[in-house]
Amino acid sequence: MVNKYIFSFSLITSLFFINIIDVKAQTDTSQQKDLWDNQIYIGNKVTFGSGTWRYAAELQTRLKDDFQQLDNWFVEFTASNLLSDKFEIVYDFRASIKPTMVEYRPGIGLLYKNYDNALKFTNQTKIQVDLGNHGEIATAFRNVMFFNRKINDNITATLVAGFIYRWQEDWNGFQYVRVGPGISYTFDEQHRLNFSYFIGMENGNYPDTYWRGIPMIQLVIDISKNDKFDYTPARYLDF
């Protein structure tokens, strides 16, 4: 079962890098510099729950233009219903503060989990609606795959690949495709630090394809104490 998802992961990454090569072949050197940007995502996430419900709240800040300008900061709340050892339904709500607008994003997703020895696989499928305070409305579908491999009691290695397809009034298409590795360091039962680096392709209602280098740093604090879950919650990043 996991091998099937490894194939899917390889397919997404192959198409991603083929697209990179194609864009570079059609773009001169001066344009390439304008189409690349270094961004950074920094977040602090608190989780808690027990039984079949797990809750999380995250405050995250995103910088763009080589870390010099605020892209947005947001607060996100999620509630996961642990249906079984394989599936979770996730309800979430995000409020993003941007320089020119405020955006509200309700969403619902399905998580599929599969464990094969030391390799843990999670697939996130999600529908979201983006509601701008100036009347803008867009709908998006995302699918992201996560491969986590435990190195030792403290360190877990991660590979991530996923996309977001968006529908809006003046444009629709694959808006984001992101691929990257990561490392998760567990200090104790309550504290975990995640570090990932994504290479991202961004499209939209503009003629060029843009590329992003995105380090993501996230501190996760679990305040559940001795509360226990009926099933092991999925480990994933909601980028």
Image: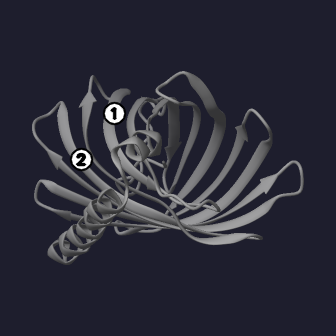
* Alpha carbons under labels 2 and 1: distance apart: 10 Å
Residue under label 2, please give it. 158
| Residue 41 in picture, x, y percent from top left | 48, 33
What type is the residue that disc 2 sits on? Thr
68 and 1: which is toward the camera: 68
Q: Nearer the viewer, residue 86 or 8?
A: 8
Q: Is residue 127 above or below residue 77?
A: below
* Residues packed near mark 2 inside 10 Å, few (<14), some (14 to 19) or many (20 plus): many
Query: For the point 35% across and 62% down, which residue is it?
Result: 26
Q: Which mark is residue 58?
A: none
Answer left or right for 125 relative to 186. right
Q: For residue 101, which quarter of the picture?
A: top right
Q: Is residue 129 left or right of residue 134?
A: left
Residue at the spot 10% in from the left edge and 36% down from the top edge:
152
Q: Identify the mark at residue 194; answer none if there is no mark.
A: 1
Which residue is rendered at x = 49% and y = 24% of the image? Answer: 67
Q: Splitting the image into 4 quarters, where does residue 58 fall? A: top right
Tell me the SS state at disc 2.
strand
How crowded pointer 1 is (Cα within 10 Å; few <14, some 14-19, many 20+) is rated as many
The picture places residue 226, in percent across and down from the top left corner, at: 41, 33
What is the three-letter code of the residue carrying label 1?
Asn
